[in-house]
Image (cartoon, rainbow, N blue to C red):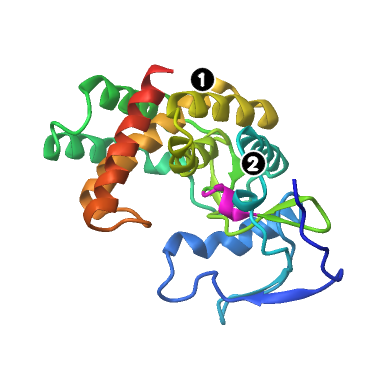
Amino acid sequence: MPRPAPEPPGVRRWSATAGRPGTHPENRFEPDALSAWGGRGAVLLHERDDDRYAMLLERAHLTTLAQAAQGEEVAAIAGSVSSRLAVPAPAGLPRLQDRAAEWEEQLRQDARDFPDALPSWTVQAATATVRELALHQPDTLIHGDLNARNILAGTREPWLAVDPKGWVGDRAYDCGTLTKSRSVVLAEQGDLARGIDRTLDAFTSAAELDRERARRWAQLSAVQAAYGGRRRGFRRGRHGAERTGLIVLVDELARILTGL
């Protein structure tokens, strides 16, 4: 795998993303997560100024994991980073289990509003995951948006996570984010089902996670994306043919993950 040329050690930069007005409110816990990790699997937080919504961060390379790796290597590296980030969560961070009731109600509403979108057993499987996995979760700090673009090549460590949500819950949740974000690339390679199967294997093996638990979180994430895409579009396709194509993709992803 090609690696970028190293940058001078000790170089740092300001980031003004955490909590800045106009950014997603869930990003306001980013400095808390980075502080708890202390550079373990993530960029170092050198200083923070919450009044200015600013952080002084360790500089990482611009090369993302999505650019530098292919196939199962992406999932294996992401799983290894996930394992590095597994630390007890500090007090005061948002808990995924507190969103379980909202998730279940939204699934019911989505099924009523879009009755022909997904097979009933696919939606039932997602609802079962909320009831059986989401209501009781460990006190573990998780990234919350661990996709391959949020893992950068580093100097101090080979790969460093950036842009965490700073949630508390089940580490297997992050496998759903990674799997969903990889689906476009895997579909372009011609065999989505096989690619997803290998992604789950590689991520859970490297992260030392239960594969079935990770699959269930990934299936829930795909179902939520299928309905969310119909309501709001996607980050990479808000309207038109691109949005339609992505809906078809996440529908297929949800069905594949239900049957794996």
Identity of the amino acid at label 1?
Answer: Glu
Residue 190 location, quadrant: top left
Q: Position of residue 255 (x, y in %)?
A: 33, 25
103, above or below 236, in the image: above
230 or 134, which is in the foreground?
Answer: 230
The C terminus lies in which quarter of the figure? top left
Q: Is residue 154 left or right of residue 214?
A: right
What crowding class fits label 1: few (fewer than 14 Cα within 10 Å), some (14-19), or many (20 or more)?
A: some
66 or 158, which is in the foreground?
Answer: 66
Q: Is residue 149 magenta?
A: yes
Which residue: 62% across, 52% down?
67
Identity of the amino acid at label 2?
Answer: Ala
Disc marking residue 212: 1
Q: Position of residue 249 (x, y in %)?
A: 33, 38
- Looking at the image, is mark 2 or mark 1 earlier in the sequence? 2
Q: Which residues are magenta?
A: 145-151
171 or 169, which is in the foreground?
Answer: 171
What crowding class fits label 2: few (fewer than 14 Cα within 10 Å), some (14-19), or many (20 or more)?
A: many
Q: Mark 2 highlights which residue?
A: 78
The N terminus lies in which quarter of the figure? top right
Q: Is residue 92 left or right of residue 243?
A: right
